[in-house]
Amino acid sequence: MALSWLLLILLALAVIGFFTGRSRALASAGGDARDLHSLPSYYGYNVALSALVPALGVLIVWLLAQPMIVNSTVSSLIPEQSIPEGSDRGLIMSEVRRVAVGLDGAVAAGAMTEAQAQDANSDIDQLTATLKDAGQVLTQEISQPILIAAQKYRSMTSTGSVAMQAIVLAVALLGAAFAYIRTHKEFRARNVVEQAVLALLLLAASIAILTTVGIVLSMFFETLNFFQLHSWKDFFFGSTWAPNFRGGSELSILPLLWGTLYISLIALLVAVPIGLFAAIYLSEYATGATRAVAKPLLEILAGIPTIVYGLFALLTVGPALVSMFGEGGALGVGWMASSNAVLTAGLVMGIMLIPFVSSLSDDIINAVPQSMRDGSLGLGATKSETVRQVVLPAALPGIVGAILLAASRAIGETMIVVMAAGAIAKFSGNPFEAMTTITTRIVSQLTGDTDFASPETLVAFALGLTLFIITLGLNIFALYIVRKYREQYE
Amino acid sequence: MTDISQTPGAAPAAKPRDGSLFEKDARTKRRNAAEGRFKLYGVGAIGIGLLMLIILVTNIVTAGTGAFQQSFLELNVELKADKLDKKGNRNIEDIKKVSTFGYAPLIASALEAEVQELGIQTDLKPKEMGKILSKSAQAQLRNYVIANPDQIGKTVSFRFLVNSRVDGYMKGRVTRESIANDKSITAAQLDFVDQLRDAGVLYKAFNPDFIFGSDASDQRPEAAGIGVSMLGSLFMMFVVLALALPIGVAASIYLEEFAPQNRLTDIIEVNISNLAAVPSIVFGILGLAVFINYMHLPTSAPLVGGLVLTLMTLPTIIISTRASLKAVPPSIRDAALGVGASKMQAVFHHVLPLAAPGILTGTIIGLAQALGETAPLLLIGMVGFIASNPPDGIVAGFLSPNSAMPAQIYEWSKRADPAFYERAWGGIIILLIFLVTMNTIAVLLRRRFERRW
């Protein structure tokens, strides 16, 4: 709540700043706006921005830094020997936070006074009982070090937030005052404001970089932690995926990678021929009217959320395939035991990728110069001969790029495989068996109760990083090919 | 010439065409057949694609429309004062002390009375009869009594949900064969249901609670609704709109209008195009690591979901905004600069308003994409959570745990009772209605405001 009030106060300051700045500028010019260097509103904007921007900057930095500082200080309060066997600092710290939140809640509910909550010598059992009575959730027994740490955590957090509010407000006021004093008819307010706006625009554009850095860092450090707990050789070169939350897991990416690639391959086997022929027909044969109807209809397939495809695979395609290939099915072959299978996921993913392949290939085929077609037709080739022997070879690099982009999409696809591919990691060539993929394992290792100190959870970050690198590599390569190809005909 | 052609050892001239020019020879026929086949492949490919679309849509509609209807049983329940308010003082605290179990006998006796009144012959014991009702019936009755304590002692007509098996029987999903091994319902109960249906007290009707209601535990599929997770999605979309639109527009303006040709600009551009292709699950990992583990924002909160989806949608919005900025002809900028505007004024006063329809279109499409996205939400804990209460207040809407529409659909698809599958399809219909509406608005905006320069 305090934060939203702080933001509201800042906004109010900015609004007040705008009007006072503007009127001061007008006053300095004797009420005649023509004597000002800039339009009057720029003086207002200058004061408002000076109040708002540095204060918000301080606020954001503070909000990011405070948890880090508090955590490291509090964490150092917990002696090594008070960490029980089978636990670790991270778990203790989350317990500390829980106790701190519990104390806050109890104080807010009036179950204890502030002094009681901060009393380091208070009786642990009694405190636990009070907290439980106040309806606070405690998962572990509170111990003396945890209590002291929690109290320190509370006091640091509350001092921190009071200090933050004071400093942020002071920065806002100082900024506004500085800009207000500088406001004079000679002051080049427009230039200053425009510089500031330009800096803000640049900041917004840099968020893309920040996101990438965030993605890489967040996965990189956890991956490093993972490799300290688990050998990297097993991860990259092992042959078994068998997570075991009691320890001794075998966590190798290879069976997952196999499942991922196998499903993607089936998806591409469905999507590439259909998508490519659809693109050829649309760009070479179809009349304008057909094209105007068929192309958007096909693209609807691309706009359907993946959860819909997942459900379609799980509840429709899977059972349909079982009724065909399963025990006592229409073909009487009994190959398929359950509806979760590589084929189910692959087929549905293929349907999803059809419009992706077709619209990319369509663009690429359209980029082949008409003169090449005319030349071929002029020599007496039929339309299909022209397509096969002139247009496609010319468009081939671009089409390969499009297929690679589709492959990267297939490898990173999550919902369809989570719902339809199954959970068994193995090397097998049988498309009727259930197999699992990298994305499926990321989801299953990171949902539910996760303990960020166990290799079974951390492996998800290593998997994520690998996935990120694979898809990124495929994309960069594909875009490179497509761009190279475009240049050829420009 | 003739001499040369008759020189010994020269290759014999190609065999002359026999027959008429109007008659196709074997080779031409073959080539034309290949041409026809090739064209057919193309038609076939488009046909398969459209067929899949049709199958998908028909499947969704046939499997999902059932969720909007629910079977109800109409009962006249006598709210006996001696059961509900033993002290007789109509004190609300005393009434609240009667638990939901205390309401079961009322329903049972009401059902018995109704059976007698309608003259239905059945061997079922009252307790077995009561089992055709949903487990939520007692809670429904209790809530009514607590809301209207003055009705105690009167007989009130209620419309109760029946249990999901009975509902499935009414919809044809459950048959007498399929319940052979089912412990929760017997064939005799189905006979009883038939009699009630013939008497007109058990019927199917439109069920607004599916659209506006909250999720229910996995014992009561008949009571589950998507309303609360819809609110979760709505709050997430607020976050996405409030962050992605300004940041996306600002970034595009910078890149399109101000960015110098330098290293930094290159890095930003490469980053944006790569982010657009990063698998969505990776954004989920980012959200988990940064927003939840590092910043300790609340798990399952729409705020976190919105932040993750913002990062995911930003590249889409930036790419479309840049395209619409680029479509504004340079003459507009030149004219503004010519009458003395600064570069910034030219962009903000002239280029941006002209590009606004395009930006809006791109934003709506980006929002639609974010609305349907599920994978990142799995990792930040918006699944596995029963969204049973609507958030109280706006702050709670952003911060208290909630689900989102696609996450709710996924959750239903994982539950054991097949009655939830129908609800999952129904949820998809609602989700798709939202997406179709948003995309239609986007297309109409483009049609209405698009300017050809």
Image (cartoon, coloured by chain):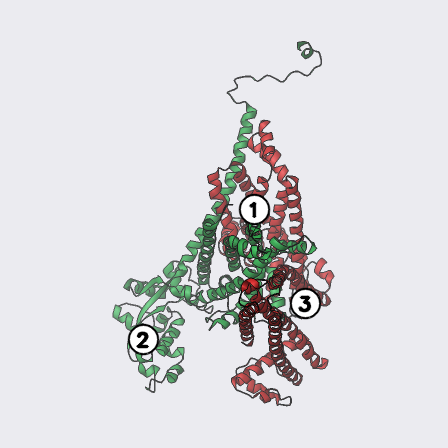
Q: Disc 3: which chain? A: A
Residue at image location 61% in from the left, 90% down from the top: A123
Mark 1 falls on what kind of element?
A: helix
> Distance of mark 1 from mark 3, alpha carbons?
37 Å
Residue at image location 56% in from the left, 30% down from the top: A382
Amino acid type for the residue under numbered disc 1: Ala
Q: Crowding at label 1, few (<14), some or many (≥20) Cα neighbours within 10 Å?
A: many
> Horizontal and vertical percent for residue B441?
45, 54
> Horizontal and vertical percent for residue B96?
39, 81
> Horizontal and vertical percent for residue A189?
60, 64
Q: Within the image, what quadrant is residue A148 found in?
A: bottom right
Q: Foreground residue, B123 or B368? A: B368
Q: Foreground residue, B299 or A254? A: B299
Q: Crowding at label 2, few (<14), some or many (≥20) Cα neighbours within 10 Å?
A: some
Mark 2 falls on what kind of element?
A: helix
Amino acid type for the residue under numbered disc 2: Ser
Verify CB contact (< 8 Å) between mark 1 and mark 2.
no
> Distance of mark 1 from mark 2, alpha carbons?
61 Å
Q: Which residue is mark 1?
A: A271
Q: Which mark is residue B109?
A: 2
Q: Disc 2: which chain? A: B
Residue at image location 38% in from the left, 79% down from the top: B102
Chain shaded green: B
